[in-house]
Image (spheres, rainbow, N blue to C red):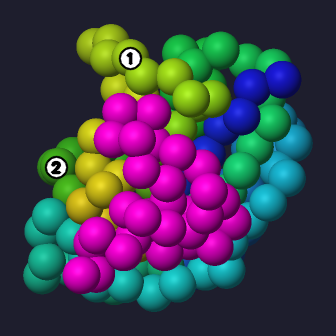
Amino acid sequence: MHTLFLGLGSNLGDRKEALNHAIEAISMQIGIVEKASRIIETPAWGKTDLPDYLNQVILVKTKLWPLECIAKLLKIESSLGRERIEKWASRTIDIDILYFNHWFFNTPDLTVPHPFIQDRYFVLEPLNEIAPDFIHPVLRLNSKELLDHLTA
């Protein structure tokens, strides 16, 4: 089984319901959700004049390979009303692959680990809650250290 960390976010509609529906779909199509952080509310990132987001990180055990996961996750986003019109636009749901095992790779369809983990409080805070000792395979810092560097 592979270890998959996913970042979830929503800033349109019933945000909490969108997160719950995403987790339900991930459980049915991707793998076993072993841990889920609490939900936090944060300001929009990248394009800051948008409604606040609800964010959460989950740990999933899956038999799927990374490109299979991203294909299924994009379908889940679409089924939950996600429209890809503009970068960093508001969305009903956003599902990002943060980590896949301790691997690092870059393809046209997927970069692992997610390239902005170290810059995003809304990822690091919930990630630190469920996996403080997980080590970023490129930066060689764990979640707690990355969060400490961000808030320092």
Residue 81 visible (yes or no): no
Provide residue 58's location: percent of width, then percent of height: 67, 57
Residue 84 visible (yes or no): yes
Which element carries disc 1, helix, strand or loop? strand
Above/below status of 131 relative to 75 = below
Quadrant location, the N terminus: top right
The residue at 63%/29% (across/down) is: 101
Q: Magenta span covers which residues?
A: 123-152
Gap between marks 2 and 1 measured at Cα: 25 Å
Name the residue carrying label 1. 105
Q: Earlier in the sequence, mark 2 or mark 1?
A: 2
Name the residue carrying label 2. 86
The residue at 62%/57% (across/down) is: 133
> Which amino acid, by three-letter code, is at mark 2?
Glu
Q: Is 127 colored magenta in this rendering?
A: yes
Q: Are marks 2 and 1 in contact (CB under 8 Å)?
A: no
Which element carries disc 2, helix, strand or loop? loop
Left or right of residue 87: residue 81: right
Provide residue 74's location: percent of width, then percent of height: 50, 34
Checking the image for residue 65, the label placed there is none
Above/below status of 64 relative to 38 = above
Determine the image quadrant of residue 120.
bottom left
Question: Of 11 and 119, which appears nearest the observer?
Answer: 119
Question: Of 25 and 98, which appears nearest the observer?
Answer: 98
The residue at 75%/43% (across/down) is: 60
Left or right of residue 37: residue 24: right
